[in-house]
Image (cartoon, helix red, strand yellow):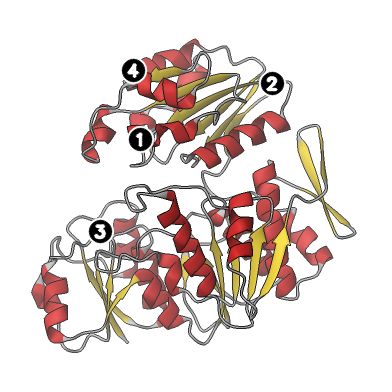
């Protein structure tokens, strides 16, 4: 197979390129700019493009598949030539399906918890010495790549609702056609793509329709929106497996969960993670993994990168980093830390960084999201607004949207850094939530100077 990637430098695109190269395919690619770590990763494999930019000469009749990344625009000169030549053009998820047509496919969808649930399933399968391929949107301990494509009979995919490519605007998870599907919950997000909640909800209805006949849908029955969607769109040719919170208890900051007749002491915590665990348990049970094997495996699961990831800890404080940015994720992460350490003060610092979170019209969705934090701080930068070509977001609008007493809002990183250095760290936990990096602030240095 000869495969060419247009926009090979994407975080997941370059991982697929490496996976196919390792499978023995002839892989080429192009991009106008490739950042780290993609540049080094591609260079190590010998498939880093020799020069930056788009070159129609890269597109030749011998190419079996063109894989188009989200970064490439509709008027890309390589894409234009590929169309003129009648070559087969795939979005990332379309190609994943092509490579997995003969495999049992597991797809984990939902507005939150996709990465962690997928990671849990992968962890248990690896622990159980089961051969499988995978696609996940984060770095995971024990896995060199975030994409693996081999001749394994099983594939586990994080199923994203974001558009597949510049020319295929349908959500990625519409192209996976799973035998086992998971929906972790539904909460409106990506308003630049899904301008109304009803339109967003419709995408999950279609996802359910895409499940293979005689397949299984495992869903979070504590989510009323999801529960209603399923009740109103029931299929007779698939099996439904609802789940809710498992039995658990917390002692000295450690969560123990009951799995069948087994107990497992966890390295993770929070009700949202316990729900993710229940989803993963049902997937693994469907695959024939016993309760005792699942309990043994999940006890050593440490989480995915930036999902309540511990940055530093001592007898006085813990510092957590989390990818949370959407309202439901912010609420879940704050509640998790507060529940796990009820005697400690919780300082929650949220960076607004995504299109939705920087949109004044979306701000009311955050109402109450930070209520359980003892101190709430929101940060966003003028630079982030400029990059997304959004109008200025006034701090008063943010404060009104969150509707939290004594919420502090900062728009300059120097002011945020000064605030962090002023906080007493004794008997305090810090939760930093963002898909960005707070304009490069050295979090640990700021807090360690207190």
Disc 2 marks which residue?
344
Q: Secondary structure at mark 1?
A: helix
Label placed on residue 414: 4
Of the image marks 4 and 2, the number of the one nearer the N terminus: 2
Image spot of residue 387 (x, y percent): 23, 39
Quadrant position of residue 440? top left
Image spot of residue 450 (x, y percent): 52, 13
Using a 10 Å C-alpha cutoff, classify the residue at mark 3 as few (fewer than 14 neighbours), some (14 to 19) or many (20 or more): some
Give the side of residue 191 with respect to residue 49, left or right: right
Q: CA distance from mark 4 to mark 3?
A: 32 Å
Q: Secondary structure at mark 2?
A: loop
Q: Are marks 4 and 1 in contact (CB under 8 Å)?
A: no
Q: Secondary structure at mark 4?
A: helix
Image position of 294 with respect to 78: above or below: above
Of the image marks 4 and 1, the number of the one nearer the N terminus: 1
Disc 3 marks which residue?
71
Q: CA distance from mark 4 to mark 2?
A: 27 Å
Of the image marks 3 and 2, the number of the one nearer the N terminus: 3
Q: Is residue 165 visible?
A: yes
Of the image marks 2 and 1, the number of the one nearer the N terminus: 2
- Of residue 264 and residue 87, the one placed in the foreground of this image is 87
Label placed on residue 377: none
Q: Are marks 4 and 2 in contact (CB under 8 Å)?
A: no
Q: Name the residue at 44% across, 14% down.
A: 419
Give the side of residue 379 with respect to residue 132, left or right: left
């Amino acid at each position: 197979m000869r495969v060419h990637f247009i926009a090979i430098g994407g975080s997941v695109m370059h991982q697929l390129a490496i996976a196919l190269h390792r499978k023995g395919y002839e892989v080429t690619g192009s991009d106008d700019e490739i950042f780290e770590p993609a540049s080094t990763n591609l260079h190590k494999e010998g498939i880093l493009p020799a020069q930056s930019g788009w070159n129609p000469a890269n597109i030749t009749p011998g190419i079996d598949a063109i894989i188009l990344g989200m970064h490439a625009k509709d008027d890309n000169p390589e894409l234009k030539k590929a169309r003129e030549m009648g070559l087969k053009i795939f979005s990332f998820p379309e190609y994943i399906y092509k490579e997995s047509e003969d495999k049992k496919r597991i797809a984990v969808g939902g507005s939150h918890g996709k990465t962690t649930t997928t990671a849990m399933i992968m962890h248990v399968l690896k622990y159980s010495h089961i051969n499988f391929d995978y696609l996940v949107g984060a770095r995971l301990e024990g896995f060199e790549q975030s994409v693996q494509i081999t001749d394994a009979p099983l594939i586990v995919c994080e199923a994203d609702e974001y558009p597949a490519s510049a020319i295929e605007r349908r959500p990625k998870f519409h192209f996976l056609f799973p035998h086992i599907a998971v929906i972790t919950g539904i909460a409106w997000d990506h308003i630049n793509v899904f301008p109304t909640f009803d339109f967003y909800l419709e995408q999950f209805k279609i996802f359910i329709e895409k499940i293979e006949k005689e397949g299984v849908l495992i869903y979070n029955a504590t989510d009323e929106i999801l529960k209603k969607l399923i009740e109103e769109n029931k299929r007779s040719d698939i099996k439904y497996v609802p789940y809710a919170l498992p039995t658990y208890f917390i002692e000295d900051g450690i969560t123990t969960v009951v799995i069948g007749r087994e107990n497992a002491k966890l390295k993770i915590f929070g009700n949202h993670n316990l729900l993710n665990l229940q989803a993963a348990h049902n997937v693994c049970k469907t695959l024939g993994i016993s309760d005792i094997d699942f309990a043994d495996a999940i006890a050593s699961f440490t989480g995915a990168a930036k999902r309540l990831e511990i940055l530093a800890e001592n007898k006085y404080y813990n510092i957590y980093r989390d990818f949370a940015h959407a309202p439901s994720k912010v609420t879940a992460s704050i509640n998790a830390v507060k529940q796990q350490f009820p005697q400690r003060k919780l300082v929650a610092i949220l960076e607004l960084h995504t299109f939705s979170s920087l949109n004044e019209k979306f701000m009311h969705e955050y109402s109450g999201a930070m209520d359980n934090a003892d101190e709430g701080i929101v940060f966003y930068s003028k630079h982030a607004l400029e990059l997304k070509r959004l109008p200025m977001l006034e701090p008063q609008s943010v404060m009104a949207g969150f509707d939290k007493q004594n919420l502090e809002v900062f728009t300059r990183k120097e002011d945020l850094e000064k605030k962090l250095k002023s906080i007493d760290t004794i008997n305090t936990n810090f939760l930093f939530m963002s898909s960005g990096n707070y304009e490069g602030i050295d979090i640990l240095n700021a807090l360690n100077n207190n």
